[in-house]
């Protein structure tokens, strides 16, 4: 008799073969378009400016980056909304390259897109940057000349877009200037407060402590709430580097085929549907290194509450950290194993979102019927101190950011 897990494995193999067959049938024109998309810089994080930033310059510094360095700490702390203006010169040479390359890097060929780089959207050997904690910071392209608006607060690091086992020979000379935010920027540090208006015992009386699977069995813990519009909610997650997760397997197969060329597809692996307020999650968000995400990723589900708080939309979320695989006690299949200390993931959500400058207020609430220990329907155990993270978003910052990024 074939076990359920064997059937799942066979289905997965068939799905993989189908995906490969579909990839092989992609027209050359589409493949070329995908390569162009992968090598272009993300418009939301940086831009080439013809005018200098209007804000006052507060730092001017020059650093040398040698080809054997992956990342270098500049010693510069930046704030959300500040301009990081970089100009760079120099040459690197890679063993498999036909010629030297500059800070813009080597345009990646179709074959080279299989290489895993810190930032797959830039050329091999390109100058790149990141701001904040190395574990959560999202790299961005700097190249030979760029003006980047810092999306979060933190330490600025400069690096080279290369693998640790494939370094180049040579040096980049990098001139860095930090300018104050534009006059219309509305980025502010999040205020740690004791209470947030409207979020009281009556709210927690209407929000279940746990979400559930389709059969109604209690699952993950509700461990964070967000007050803010849908646009502001999406903006804060996107700015913090979280990625929307595909809603179903079918969309993931197609997305995986298209994005898999650059090894960036697995962040969007679908989450199983879980339920709150009688319906599946409205959004799924994931945050991880693409190469590791099959086994490990930070992820969360979020629902729009069927009621408002102080005339504001309330979002209710459950965040967990996948750390591997384990046996699903329901059917002996394979499921993701979550870190049993789920407070670490709640804190991770807080850290990534508050660093964006798009969160106005932060607090932690211990509900009257706090959940501190439980098991999921798959058999995994978890524990918590029972506190729920509550974030109130800065709507004005989200509005200004949206206007500044819209086409002129």
Image (cartoon, helix red, strand yellow):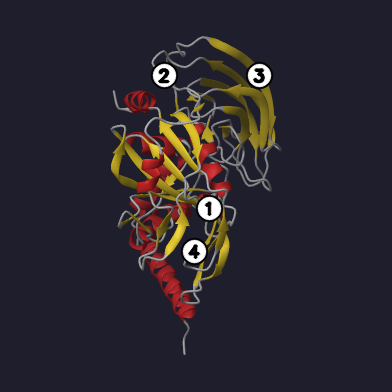
- List the residue tagged with mark 1: 297
Q: Toward the viewer: 127 or 229?
A: 229
Mark 2 or 3, nearer chain start = 3
Query: Residue 153's x, y, as percent?
Result: 55, 27
- List the residue tagged with mark 3: 62
Mark 4 or 3, nearer chain start = 3
Find the distance from the CA under tag 1 to the CA under tag 3.
36 Å
Are the residues tagged 2 and 4 within 8 Å (C-beta)? no
Mark 1 or 2, nearer chain start = 2
- List the residue tagged with mark 4: 376
Query: Residue 343's x, y, as percent?
Result: 56, 48
Residue at x 69% of width, y 35% of height: 67
Mark 2 or 4, nearer chain start = 2
Find the distance from the CA under tag 4 to the CA under tag 1.
18 Å
Q: Secondary structure at mark 3?
A: strand
Q: Secondary structure at mark 4?
A: loop
Tell me, for residue 185, which label it has, or none. 2
């Amino acid at each position: 008799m074939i076990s359920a897990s064997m059937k799942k494995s066979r289905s997965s193999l068939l799905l993989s073969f189908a995906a490969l067959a579909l990839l092989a049938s992609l027209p050359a024109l589409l493949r070329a378009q995908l390569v162009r998309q992968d090598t272009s810089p993300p418009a939301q994080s940086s831009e080439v400016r013809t005018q200098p930033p209007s804000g006052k310059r507060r730092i001017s510094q020059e650093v040398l980056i040698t080809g054997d360095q992956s990342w270098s700490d500049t010693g510069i702390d930046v704030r959300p909304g500040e301009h990081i203006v970089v100009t760079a010169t120099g040459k690197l040479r890679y063993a498999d390259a036909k010629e030297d390359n500059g800070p813009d890097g080597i345009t990646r060929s179709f074959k080279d897109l299989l290489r895993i780089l810190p930032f797959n959207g830039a050329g091999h050997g390109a100058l790149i940057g990141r701001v904040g904690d190395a574990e959560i910071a999202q790299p961005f392209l700097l190249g030979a000349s760029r003006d980047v608006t810092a999306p979060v607060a933190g330490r600025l690091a400069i690096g080279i877009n290369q693998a640790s086992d494939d370094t180049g020979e040579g040096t980049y000379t990098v001139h860095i200037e930090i300018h104050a935010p534009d006059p219309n920027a509305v980025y502010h540090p999040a205020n740690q407060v004791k209470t947030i208006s409207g979020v009281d015992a009556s709210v927690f009386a209407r929000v279940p402590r746990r979400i559930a699977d389709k059969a109604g069995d209690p699952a993950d813990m509700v461990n964070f709430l967000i007050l803010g519009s849908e646009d502001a909610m999406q903006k804060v997650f996107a700015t913090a580097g979280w990625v929307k997760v595909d809603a179903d397997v079918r969309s993931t197969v197609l997305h995986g085929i298209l994005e898999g060329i650059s090894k960036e597809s697995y962040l969007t692996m679908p989450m199983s549907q879980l339920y709150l307020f009688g319906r599946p999650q409205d959004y799924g968000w994931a945050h991880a290194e693409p190469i590791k995400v099959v086994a490990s990723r930070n992820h969360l589900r979020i629902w729009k509450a069927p009621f408002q708080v102080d005339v504001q939309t309330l979002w209710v979320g459950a965040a967990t950290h996948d750390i591997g695989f384990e046996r699903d006690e329901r059917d002996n299949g394979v499921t993701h194993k979550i870190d049993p200390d789920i407070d670490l993931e709640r804190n991770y959500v807080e850290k990534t979102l508050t660093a964006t400058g798009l969160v106005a207020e932060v607090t932690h609430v211990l509900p009257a019927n706090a959940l501190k220990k439980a098991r999921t329907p798959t058999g995994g155990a978890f524990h918590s101190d029972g506190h729920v993270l509550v974030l109130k978003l800065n709507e004005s910052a989200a509005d200004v950011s949206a206007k500044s990024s819209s086409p002129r």
